[in-house]
Image (cartoon, rainbow, N blue to C red):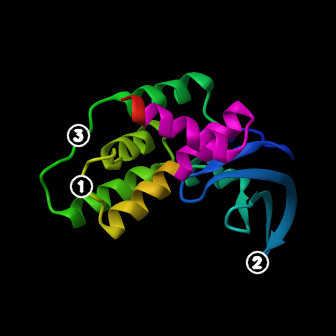
């Protein structure tokens, strides 16, 4: 079994279904007779605290922040040409949600790229807009944590890259 990475208070981490969170500590608790070591993570945006058993962290998808290189690759992905399949929206929406929940910045960047609308293009449907914003916000929050900046600054950077594409 893969050894779980070590987490300490103050670390930023990514949980696939919730995005970027901050580790507030690791503590031992006894739950149903089992002694568990739990990583405690807060997600300010969702006002939520998550406790992940340390031995389940790798299989849950919990990971450290992406490297600068991976974020640069994600920004390069944004500059690429949108690839929109000619399948039913419900099927595409499921694929987009799966990519967002994968926690992989490059897959999330693909969703942002594919759903981005420039001025003069047809408007998005409500659900397209929701998925686009969820992907953009998730990517921006990790970019902000990697670059040690604010989320709105990272969002503007993403929008500029998309406009230039």
How far is mark 3 from mark 1, CA to CA?
16 Å
The residue indicated by pointer 1 is 122
Q: Which of marks 3 and 1 is nearer the N terminus?
A: 3
Secondary structure type for disc 3? loop
Task: Please report the residue visible at 40 percent of the width from the left and 45 percent of the height from the top.
Answer: 112
Q: Is residue 98 above or below residue 84?
A: below
Q: Is residue 119 left or right of residue 52?
A: left
> What is the chief secondary structure element of the magenta stretch?
helix
- Quarter-of-image position of residue 29: bottom right
Q: What stretch is highlighted in magenta?
A: 137-162
Whole-percent x, y for residue 144 in the image: 67, 39
Q: Give the CA separation, mark 2 to mark 1.
A: 55 Å
Q: In which quarter of the image is the N terminus?
A: top right
* Position in image of residue 46 (x %, y %): 67, 67
Give the label on residue 32, or none: 2
Picture residue at 60% right of the left edge, 33% below the top:
66
Residue 89 position (above or below residue 68): below
* Mark 2 or mark 3, earlier in chain: 2
Q: Residue at x 74, y 61 (%)?
A: 44
Residue 63 in view here: no
**Residue 106 can be seen, yes or no:** yes
Considering every residue shown, the one lying at the far bottom of the view is: 32
Residue 69 % position (x, y) = 56, 22
Classify 18 as above or below 34: above
Q: Residues within 10 Å of mark 2 (few under 14, many from 20)?
A: few
**Mark 2 falls on what kind of element?**
loop
């Amino acid at each position: 079994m893969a050894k779980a990475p070590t987490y300490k208070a103050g670390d930023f981490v990514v949980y696939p279904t919730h995005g970027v969170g901050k580790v507030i500590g690791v503590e031992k608790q006894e739950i149903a007779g089992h002694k568990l070591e739990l990583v405690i993570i807060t997600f300010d945006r969702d006002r939520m605290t998550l406790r992940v058993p340390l031995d389940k962290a790798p299989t849950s998808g919990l990971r450290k922040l992406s490297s600068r290189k991976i974020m640069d690759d994600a920004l390069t992905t944004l500059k690429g040409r949108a690839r929109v399949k000619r399948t039913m929206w419900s099927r595409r929406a499921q694929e987009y949600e799966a990519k967002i929940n994968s926690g992989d910045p490059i897959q999330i960047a693909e969703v942002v790229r594919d759903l981005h609308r420039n001025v003069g293009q047809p408007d998005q449907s409500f659900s397209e807009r929701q998925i686009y914003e969820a992907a953009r916000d998730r990517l921006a929050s990790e970019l902000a944590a990697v670059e040690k900046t604010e989320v709105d600054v990272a969002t503007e950077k993403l929008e500029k890259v998309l406009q230039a594409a």
